[in-house]
Image: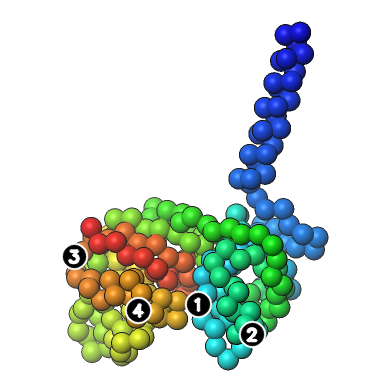
């Protein structure tokens, strides 16, 4: 009798582990859909098909939408995907899509262009991955387009096109105005990196945009955002916490 009970318990535990693994592990992809590993290995300019979940909409304009999307293994940037305004309203964070397009690269940023899509059943929101220790390292590129966090950064001076120093700038050279992107420099382990609040993603009415304009040189901050790439790490920050 004890042996039978032991076998039953072992079977129950094994089933429980399988269930937990299915819940917490990688997504099961539909037929013809790439895993994230296969997507990473695909050549630039090759056709790709992915399934992922919308994480943020950068913009919808002139019948095209630009999205950050992710699965449980990695993340994607879908650039100017043809989309009606009606469908754009449906592509809220968590929405699952199947997209087919071409893998492309622009100034280091790997993205999907000329994509078509279908909305599918399912929902998932990725948690921020702390990549503070990867700043300044080649490994940071492996987190491209993911939702990430940075801890214990210090605001350092940005320099505008006239050589003037400031804690932040409208546009990278200070040539902009309210409603444009807000750029700021941060220091970590003796190195300086340029972050920005992307107006198309989080505009002037958002907390992060307003907070960026209160930054002072020497402020210590934590922040979260999407790991965009432009000639190196250039994250689109969605949250700033001043310590």
Compute the Cα span from label 1 to label 4. 15 Å
Residue 97, percent from left and from top: 67, 68
Earlier-in-chain disc, 2 versus 4: 2
Q: Which residue is mark 3?
A: 218
Please name the residue shown 35% across and 86% down the image. 179
Q: Give the label on residue 84, or none.
A: 2
Residue 4, percent from left and from top: 77, 13
Earlier-in-chain disc, 2 versus 1: 1
Under circle 4, the secondary element is loop
Q: Callout 4 environment at 10 Å: few (<14), some (14 to 19), or many (20+)?
A: few
Earlier-in-chain disc, 3 versus 2: 2
Position of 17 relative to 178 (above/below): above
Under circle 1, the secondary element is strand
Q: Relative to 192, is 129 on the left or the right?
A: right
Compute the Cα span from label 2 to label 4. 25 Å
Please name the residue shown 19% across and 70% down the image. 216
Kindly indicate the quadrant of the structure image that contains residue 89.
bottom right
Under circle 2, the secondary element is loop
Please name the residue shown 51% across and 70% down the image. 56
Compute the Cα span from label 2 to label 1. 15 Å
Please name the residue shown 42% across and 71% down the image. 236
Q: Relative to 213, is 229 on the left or the right?
A: right
Q: Give the label on residue 58, or none.
A: 1
Compute the Cα span from label 3 to label 2. 45 Å
């Amino acid at each position: 009798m004890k042996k039978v009970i032991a076998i039953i318990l072992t079977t129950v535990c094994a089933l429980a582990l399988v269930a937990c693994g299915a819940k917490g592990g990688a997504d099961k992809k539909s037929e013809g859909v790439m895993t994230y590993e296969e997507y990473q290995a695909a050549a630039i300019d090759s056709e790709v098909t992915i399934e992922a979940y919308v994480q943020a909409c950068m913009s919808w304009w002139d019948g095209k939408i630009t999205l950050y999307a992710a699965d449980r293994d990695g993340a994607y940037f879908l650039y100017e995907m043809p989309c009606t305004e009606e469908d754009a309203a449906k592509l809220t964070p968590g929405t699952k899509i199947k997209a087919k397009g071409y893998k492309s690269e622009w100034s280091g940023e790997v993205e999907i262009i000329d994509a078509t899509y279908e909305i599918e059943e399912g929902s998932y929101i990725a948690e921020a991955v702390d990549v503070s220790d990867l700043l300044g390292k080649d490994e940071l590129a492996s987190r491209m387009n993911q939702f990430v966090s940075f801890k214990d950064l210090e605001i350092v001076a940005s320099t505008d096109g006239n050589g003037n120093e400031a804690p932040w700038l409208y546009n990278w050279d200070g040539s902009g105005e309210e409603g444009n992107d807000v750029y700021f420099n941060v220091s970590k382990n003796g190195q300086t990196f340029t972050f920005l609040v992307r107006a198309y993603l989080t505009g002037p009415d958002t907390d992060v945009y307003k907070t960026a304009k209160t930054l002072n040189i020497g402020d210590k901050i934590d922040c979260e955002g999407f790991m965009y790439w432009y000639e190196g790490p250039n994250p689109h920050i969605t949250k700033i916490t001043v310590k």
